[in-house]
Image (cartoon, rainbow, N blue to C red):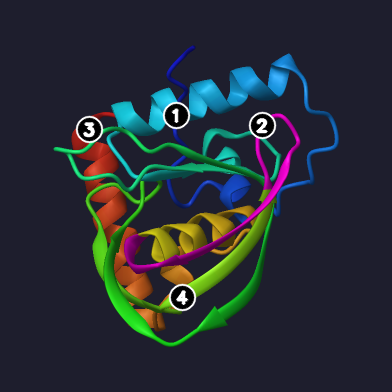
Amino acid sequence: MAIRPILTYPDPRLREPAKPVDTFDEELKVLVADMAETMYDAPGCGLAANQIGVDKRVFVIDVADEDEPSDLKVFVNPEIVSKDGNQSWREGCLSFPGVSEEVKRAKTVVVRAQDAEGNAFQLEADGLLAVAIQHENDHLDGVLMIDKFNALKRRMIGKKVARSVSEAGV
């Protein structure tokens, strides 16, 4: 396992839609393990493969509270098949260091995906898990949280990210 560098906005690779996974092999398992280690190290609760420069439809999520055991979920070739309701959640993003903003999303989602072995599953989620699934799935489509805001807010967020990256020496 290895911690991989996380791309930060405005890296153009974050805008490229990821390609479906068709080979479920050791390379994919290593990618998933690296993504989990990178996400936990950041720390974050979700990470899409294209956030580390890998052009594959894969994301990992763990929304367990700090006092709970890890609950890592792996989504390969995810597809959100239904959304219901509305909620607003203060979201952060590992590709937008130092930024957290209220984002409106569906309250409940149903997602179909495969695990790292290629086994298909379907999951209904609400709350933070639903938010994380929608956020990471957006990444795979080249959609970023900044796209949810008006032009003024996007400029402000862009400046905040640039400041955070500069201060971190990235």
Q: Which residue is painted at 33% across and 62% down in the image? A: 128
- Real-space CA distance between mark 4 and mark 2, rounded to the nearest whole angstrom: 24 Å
Q: In front of the other: label 1 or label 3? A: 1
Residue 46 shown left or right of residue 141 in the figure: left
In the picture of the structure, the residue carrying the numbered disc 3 is 168
Amino acid carrying mark 4 in the image: Thr
Residue 108 has which mark?
4
Q: Which residue is painted at 62% across and 77% down in the image? A: 82
Q: To which quarter of the image does residue 156 belong?
A: bottom left
Where is residue 24 drawn, in percent x and y?
78, 27
In the picture of the structure, the residue carrying the numbered disc 1 is 36
Where is residue 119 drawn, in percent x and y?
73, 39
The magenta stretch spans which residues? Answer: 114-128
The local secondary structure at tag 2 comes to loop
Q: Are marks 4 and 2 in contact (CB under 8 Å)?
A: no
- Real-space CA distance between mark 4 and mark 1, rounded to the nearest whole angstrom: 24 Å
Residue 166 shown left or right of residue 131 in the figure: left
Q: Nearer the viewer, residue 124 or 89?
A: 124
Q: Nearer the viewer, residue 145 or 65?
A: 65
Residue, far right: 22
- Real-space CA distance between mark 3 and mark 4, rounded to the nearest whole angstrom: 36 Å
Amino acid carrying mark 1 in the image: Ala
Q: In front of the other: label 4 or label 1? A: 4
In the picture of the structure, the residue carrying the numbered disc 2 is 116
Q: In front of the other: label 2 or label 1? A: 2
Where is residue 104 drawn, in percent x and y?
37, 80
**Which of pointers 4 and 2 lies earlier in the amino acid sequence?**
4
Residue, far top: 1
